[in-house]
Image (cartoon, rainbow, N blue to C red):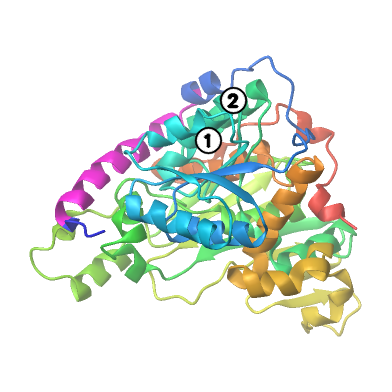
Amino acid sequence: MDFNFSSWSRRRFVQLGAASALTTSLASASASQKASASTGSDTMVGVPFEKRNPRIALVGVGSRGTGLLKMLIALDAQIVAICDVVKEKAESGADLVEKDGKKRPDLYTAGLHDFENMLKRSDIDFVITATPWSWHAPVALFAMNHGKDVGIEVPGVVTLEDCWDIVNTSERTRKHCFILENCCYGYNETLVLRMTNEGRFGELIYGEGAYIHDIRAELFQTKANGLWRRAEHTKRNGNLYPTHGLGPVANYMNINRGDRFGYLVSMSSNERGLDAYRKEHLQPGDPRWSEKYICGDMNTSLIKTAKGLTVTVKHTVSLPNPYSRINMIAGTKGIFEDYPPRIYLEGDKEEVFSSLDNYKNYIHPLWARQGEFAAKSGGHGGMDLLMLYRLLQCVREGLPPDIDVYDTAAWSSVGPLSVSSVAKGSAPVEFPDFTRGAWKTRSASALATMS
């Protein structure tokens, strides 16, 4: 579909910016207190999925949504409906399903809220949304309120109010809502998770995660993510995309399962990268010259957990840096650092890292059993497909999700909390306890203990 970029981009900036502008105000104590009021419902900790072969609907089939759809097809999932504001994208998605020999899914393309008409159907069990970020919470909440479990793409939800809303709604409706954090299913991440769970690094002390990725060209596209993602940099100054680096480290540390995030301090550098890129690549008169970018090029947030561990989380997408998620964990008996992967354990040759290949005996069962298929059929080296494989396994076998609504809320909350801390001169801001104390008695996740 051809777009008039000038008019469409400005309109979408207004729509998306209105949602994003709420972030800082919703980080206030009064908003958090109001949002955190107990629903009176039981916790969703350890609650299994209803056992079934789920009938799935997708909201958003752009580049990411289409990638998820292709992998779901490869996993023989039932796709019954697709929604997208761009009719051609929905039709292309339906073509993929039909080409696989399955019944053509019903399409919903009549505007921004047509997903509501789709999710009112009784023949949908599970919803996956890969929309622009400000729509994650509205889709998730509507889905749960209409009897559907839901998976939302990274970086989860974008305000503290959203975080509490998904927790409270999940508890009230007894439906699951969790973030589709593919990086938690990477080869290195799952192998190191097994090592931390078995105590190979001793008592854990600190970790570091990041999203360091030069996506300036993508941000300035006149299609796909370029139509909305750059808008986030005009509205918020903080860590806009924390979960790729944070999720695996949170798993290593058993966050929400014996420990929790306590408080955060955050600071952002100057913003220079998007301005410099614009000067080099845009012609005079381009409507994007009117945009004011306020998000610093490098955001660094430091988290301290209830038990005294520290986590550094970094974010930069507007500088010419090689890709890295850092993915580091350290304890009293050793350290692992990724990009490139290397490990040092007490007793090894002094101060010399060795290859992670020496610890292949800790390969995660998901990779041992499905790794070859995942690498051939899934994105990002296979982690995407393994995430969806495991998700379908949990639903089909009636198991609790590896990543639950409390993880989704805690990981997502780093975004608005970082914005709040930056705005307050890097003052400490406390994390809400989304589990309402349940973190104290939980054990490690099934992903860590799987055999």
**Magenta segment main secondary structure:** helix
Secondary structure beneath label 2: helix
Against 179, residue 406 (above or below) is above
Residue 248: % across, % down: 68, 57
**Mark 1 sits on what residue?**
140
Residue receiving disc 2: 169
Where is residue 326 shown, x and y percent of the image? 61, 68
Q: Quarter-wise, where is residue 343 in the image?
A: bottom right
Report if residue 270 is visible in the image.
Answer: no
Relative image position of residue 411 (x, y in whole percent): 60, 45
Disc 1 residue crowd, few under 14, some 14–19, many 20+, Cα 10 Å: many
Residue 22 drawn in magenta: yes
Q: Is residue 342 positioned above or below 417 on the image? A: below
Q: Is residue 336 left or right of residue 5?
A: right
Residue 54 in picture, x, y percent from top left: 67, 42
- Vertical comparison of 285 with 421: above or below: below
Tell me if label 2 and label 1 are in contact, CB under 8 Å: yes
Identify the image quadrant of the N terminus: bottom left
Q: Which residues are magenta?
A: 6-29
Relative side of 338 to 60, left or right: right
Q: Amino acid at mark 2?
A: Thr
Measure the C-alpha gap from mark 2 to mark 1: 9 Å
- Residue 367 appears in the figure: yes
